[in-house]
Image (tube, rainbow, N blue to C red):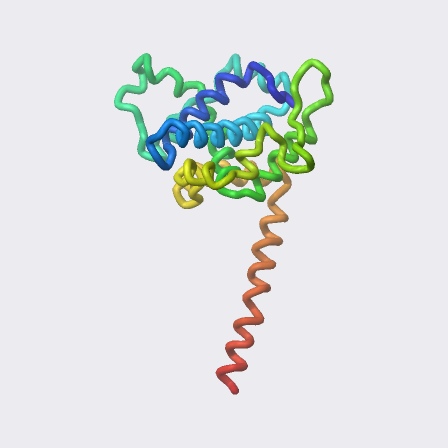
Amino acid sequence: MAGPSVELSPVIAASTHWLSRAYPSGSADTIAHTLSELQARQAVTVAAWLRYPTEVDAALVAIAGPGGSAVLDWRVGSEPEDEEAEEEGWRTWVDETVVSWAACLLADPQLARRGVDAVIAAVPLAQDRPLPYARSGKAPAEFRRLLEPDRRDMDAAVLLRHPDLLEPVASIHRDTLLYVLDAEQAELAGLASGSAGTAPSGADAADTENG
């Protein structure tokens, strides 16, 4: 697993910046902005480690570039007036798939937990780099705000975690993320369970009418 590879730093930074601009904090104060950005960064970090699971993958994206934010900008209507302008250069380091996966993680707590578990399981036990670690059996400290946001976190990220607002971005590459996390069957099982749960109430309603 690429883990905390410095090769991914530009991708993580630019993708976090894109999410923070597209879904700003719920209030204008600095603390809210920081809390929202921290949640975006944690989601992007997990997504980037899943997207580039080896040192070689991380090195290759650093050489070839991640593709940029053009499709994402179009999806949310945030295209820059002049994409060639010097101040817009950061957009070239945005990874469309990473941002889409991060949006999925922010919108779905169960999927976020699955993503973090996959990252932790795959990061090799090396002595020369940091590893995600648990806090007394709770969420890993590095991803606590993603997995266990408190009230302040939720208030700050009211837009960043809104499933309907995230959908145009999350839907782009959700299927791939579900495949990577082996979550397709789990999602189908959840849908089936939900459908099965509604059947008795319909039957009861029919019995009531017949009675």
Which sits in the foreground, 14 or 109? 109
Which sits in the foreground, 206 or 57? 206
Identified at 42% across, 40% down, the residue is 155
Q: How many marks on residues?
A: 0
Quarter-of-image position of residue 198: bottom right
Quarter-of-image position of residue 77: top left
Residue 55, how many percent across, how many down? 63, 17
Horizontal relation, residue 96 to residue 138: left or right: left
Quarter-of-image position of residue 85: top left
Residue 127, how many percent across, how many down? 72, 16
Residue 25, how many percent across, how many down? 38, 33
Horizontal relation, residue 70 to residue 122: left or right: left
Relative height, residue 144 to residue 129 (above, below): below
Horizontal relation, residue 70 to residue 135: left or right: left
Taking the image as drawn, is residue 14 in sight?
Answer: yes
Identified at 45% across, 31% down, the residue is 35
Farthest left residue in view = 81
Residue 82, how many percent across, how many down? 27, 19
Taking the image as drawn, is residue 172 in sight?
Answer: no
Identified at 62% across, 17% down, the residue is 56
Relative height, residue 103 to residue 205 (above, below): above
Relative height, residue 6 to residue 133 (above, below): above
Horizontal relation, residue 154 to residue 26: left or right: right
* Quadrant including the N terminus: top right
Identified at 61% across, 43% down, the residue is 183
